Image (tube, rainbow, N blue to C red):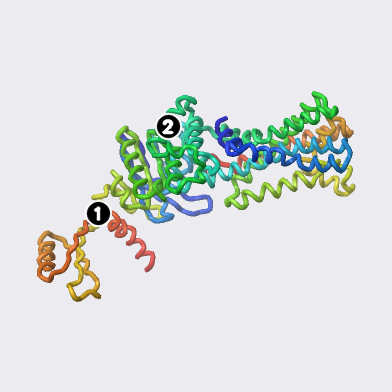
Amino acid sequence: MYIGLFDALPLLRDPMLLVVISLFSFLPVIFIFVFADQASAVQSLIGAIVLTFSFTGLFASQSVFFNKQWFRFQDMFVASKVSPASYALGLSLSGLVVALPGVVVALVLLVLSGTSSATGVVLLLGTSILLWIGLVFVGFAIGATTKNARRANSIPQVLSIALGFLPPVYYPLSRLPAIAQPIAMLIPTTHAAQLAKYYFGLISIPASEVAIGWAYLIGFAALMGFIASRRAHWVDP
Amino acid sequence: MEVVRVEGLGKTYPGGTKALEGVSFSIDRGEIFCLLGRNGAGKTTLLRILATQLKPTVGRASVLGHDVLTDPRAIRPHIAVVPQEARPQMLLSPYDHIFYMCLIRGRSRADAKERTRKVMDDLGLWEHRDKLAADLSGGLRQRLIIAMAMVADPEVLFLDEPTIGLDPLGRRSVWAMLRGLTKKGATILLTTHYLDEAEVLADHLLIVDKGRTAFLGTVEEAKGDTGVGMRVIMEPAAGNGSAAPEVLEPKSSEEILAIVERGLREKRKVTFKPASLEDAFIKIVGGSIEVENT
């Protein structure tokens, strides 16, 4: 727990930075709220919650890289009674600590909009957390493989655009041309957003597609977990 | 009592680079053991293997009686590491670094506060406790990294070039602190490029060159075995200022006496320079450079 807190401490010590980072994925919602209708704004708000979890997972890569290659704190932790599991959990959760204020604000807004149910909120959080787990693994694989600070900063940012802003997360899948829709379904954030919107009653999808969505997210997390376990080392080979 | 034992240790990295080959030595409790060598000689590789951060490919190594490869978990609670080129988190204060390292290492909050104060006092960091690490000098940042390792009160402390960037007084305070630790029974293994540091601190030293043992013994043995003796520098005679000073290496007291008499006769300034570890190091490792160049 203290590893996560230590990792998140620079942001916790600077609340202004915390607010900016926490609300980062919610900025498009403001524009959608202003320029579109309320239903679109609610969809984008759900998408923003999904993406907040995604980004915190993906940006675990920075914690992994900087603790290993830059600060070299990982070496200090290895030479202590800290276990690799608690280190990995600490770094993963540190991102959630940072994301929490934005998610709470978004959930409050969803409740106020009158579209949410307790089940919807639970399932939204469920899909988001499952996606987060998969992307934490992606983050660990990237962070452990990256060898220079420039790449450690740029790779997750490029991926966050590819996973967050391009696919139909803030906006409905139906807005994409028919030819692009299958491609969008290859992206894990699309599945998480589709499921979340479905559980809020904002879109209707067949039961088979719901099952495929969950299976995709579980499979993605398992595959990324396998890759991360091969890439990220507590003791260097 | 033997704290570290290394037998025929070797390391070849997955890419094929051979970093260590057939290194063997042991370190007793309370010793300061210095690892010396040129850049890329294998010092950090050896230190990281002993600190359970890197797997060896051949040979055996044990710390506190536990094998580094098969039983690292038994070693880790009793050791601490100052990694090479470690940096503090620039947006945190020294107090945050040290206090949280105490908590991470399993101390209670009350104990962590007490230990943080003690370590910061010992390393002259208390007055800087609330500054951001970004605002500290290079020397203070390095002291902060050392302090993060010191919180553990370890039985074995591994330091990889710990005094790099420290001013002479800062280095001496670290030396004093390390000596203080060994008096309490801690064992220290450190790598350094500062040979005066090794000369002051090392009970034993290992010089590695291209991953192999080039010398193992005490500082005095290093000087003796390499035949490095006293040097005498004789300045040019008055009125001959453009001539280079003579550097002589007397082998006996008769030769020393002869040099002194000559200096007096020719009215030349004579300076005696005792043999240093640096001379021995250059002789040991320099030999391999000559071989490399032929």
Q: How many marks overall?
A: 2
Numbered mark located on residue B223 in the image? 1
Judging from the image, mark 1 belongs to the subunit labelled: B
* Chain at tag 2: B
Please state which of the two labelled residues, at mark 2 or mark 1, is closer to the viewer.
2
* Horizontal and vertical percent position of residue B37: 37, 53
Numbered disc 2: secondary structure: helix
Q: CA distance from mark 2 to mark 1?
A: 42 Å
- State which tag comes first along the sequence, 2 or 1: 2
Of A234 and B125, which appears nearest the observer? Answer: B125
- A225 shown above or below B228: above
Q: Is residue A8 left or right of residue A128?
A: left
Check disc 1 and report its element: helix, strand or loop.
Answer: helix
Q: Residue at x 38, y 67 (%)?
A: B293
**Disc 2 residue type?**
Arg
Q: Residue at x 53, y 32 (%)?
A: A83
Q: Position of residue B32 (x, y in %)?
A: 32, 41
Where's residue A194, x and y in %?
A: 82, 36
Q: Position of residue B154 (x, y in %)?
A: 40, 34
Please tell me which residue lies in front, A225 or A202: A202
Viewer-side residue, B102 vs A29 = A29
Tell me whether circle 2 and circle 1 mark residues in contact (CB < 8 Å). Answer: no
Residue B263 shown left or right of residue B128 in the figure: left
Please state, as top left, top right, bottom left or bottom right, where the N terminus of chain A lies in the image.
top right
Residue B203, quarter of the rendered image: top left
Please check whether the numbered discs 2 and 1 fall on a single chain: yes
Residue labelled with disc 2: B117
What residue type is disc 1 on?
Lys
In the rendered view, tell whether residue A2 sits above or below residue A235.
Answer: above
**From where the camera sits, is residue B132 visible?**
yes
